[in-house]
Each structure stands twice: as C-alpha cells, then as structure tokens.
Image (cartoon, rainbow, N blue to C red):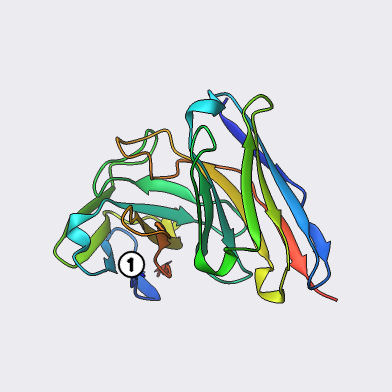
Amino acid sequence: EVQLVESGGGLVQPGGSLRLSCAASGFTFSRNAMHWVRQAPGKGLEYVSAISSNGGSTYYANSMKGRFTISRDNSKNTLYLQMGSLRAEDTAVYYCATSMVGPTRTAFDIWGQGTMVTVSS
Amino acid sequence: SYVLTQPPSVSVAPGQTARITCGGDNIGSKSVHWYQQKPGQAPVLVVYDDSDRPSGIPERFSGSNSGNTATLTISRVEAEDEADYFCQVWDSSSDHPGIFGGGTKLTVL
C-alpha cells in the first residue's frame, strides 16, 4: 500500500524552529518528486515547497523562502521540512504529497494524513 | 505570480449537475488538477491534467479547460459530494510553481 506518514508537528513559540518528517512506503521513493502543502485552520490549500527526486532542485513559496528548508533522505525513504523563524501565520496542518499520475507528475494523488503545527506563545 | 480564482460557494440539488470554475490568465495553456476535500480529511485528487480521472473516481466527475477558465463538472450530484473543491496548476515558468485556487464549497441542498 502506498503511504505517506507525517510527524513532527506540535506547539512552538514565535521565532522558534521545528522539523517535520514524512515517511514514505509502498513505492520507489527515490523516483518521485515530493511536495509540502499546508492548510491554515478554516482556510484553503497553500503550496509550501517541492524537491526533485534526487534532491538537486528545490522550490519554495515566496513567504517561506529563507525560513524553510526542504530535504530528503532517499536511503531512509523520508522527506523533511525544516522550519525556522516561525510566525503565527505559519499555523496550519502540513501535508506531504506526491504524484503517481500523468505525464507531468504535478497532480498530487498521494497525500499523508497531515501534521498540525501551532505557532503561539 | 499566477492567480487562480474560484467562486467561494456553489449550491446544487441532488441529481443535478454542479459546475465549479477556476479562472486564470490563459489557463487553457496549462494542465489543471482538481481536489475534493471533506472536513478533517486530506485532499483527494478527482481530476488531473484537465480531464483525466484517477482510478476509483466516479465517471460523474469530469473536467474541461479552455481560454481563461477551467471547469470541474459533477453530474448527478449526490449528498456525499458535498465538500470543498480546489483547482491547482503547476507553473513551471515560475520560481513558485505550485499554485492552488482559493477553493469552492459545494453544498448539496
């Protein structure tokens, strides 16, 4: 069974840091680009970051550049998101996602269950 | 950066057809994907690359894309279709390529 399982969320103070993990199973992780998407409470989906299959290319939403770092360990089938200088507006459920469909592989048919990050003092 | 515009809400009676639009500049030149999200759950891909359906998605879900508007069409709407729907594109020419629309709440009357 193809599965993504996020972990690492929790309560953090403004200005603090947190590292999220996403453990993949059931597919060849090293062949897939991976993505992070977040959703603030009661709000829509917001794209966060992406990393290519070999980790050589990364993308970030403008508001996360310089504060968040995406990485992966293909030997451990795990995706990471290191978040720093956290703000209240970073409070959200963070999902990891990937694509197994289509020629462009930009539609996310595989999602984790999400991990909640709360930034508050 | 590229912007996708969706109506905040759409209402439809059971058995009727719901159409949810996603507007963007020359969106017809891009591949559009659609997600369904129910409360407390992760999004589910229902249409990708404008009009393809993933395995397991009912044929009632279809998509089209032309000009400045992409449309998700849900035929013979059922109560279980009540959810939020999001469109998405990947703008490979941008350094911020992942873009979601604001979402549409589909209410089944």
| SS class, disc 1 | loop
Lateral position of residue A28 relative to residue A99, left or right: right
Q: What residue type is labelled 1?
A: Ala
**Residue B12 in sight here:** no
Q: Is residue A43 visible?
A: yes
Residue sitting nearer the eye, B88 or B41 = B88
Quarter placement of the N terminus of chain A: top right
Q: Position of residue B62 (x, y in %)?
A: 25, 49
Q: Who's the residue at 24% across and 61% down the image? A: B71
Residue B50: x and y, percent? Answer: 25, 50
For disc 1, the chain is B
Give left or right: position of A12 versus B15.
Answer: right
Q: Where residue A61 appears, x then y in whole percent?
A: 51, 62
Label 1 neighbourhood size at 10 Å, few (<14), some (14-19), many (20+)?
Answer: some
Residue B64 in which image quadrant? bottom left
B76 is higher (above) or lower (below) than A22: below
Q: Which residue carries the number 1 mark?
A: B13
- What residue do we see at 44% from left, 38% from top? A99
- Residue at 62% over, 28% down: A74
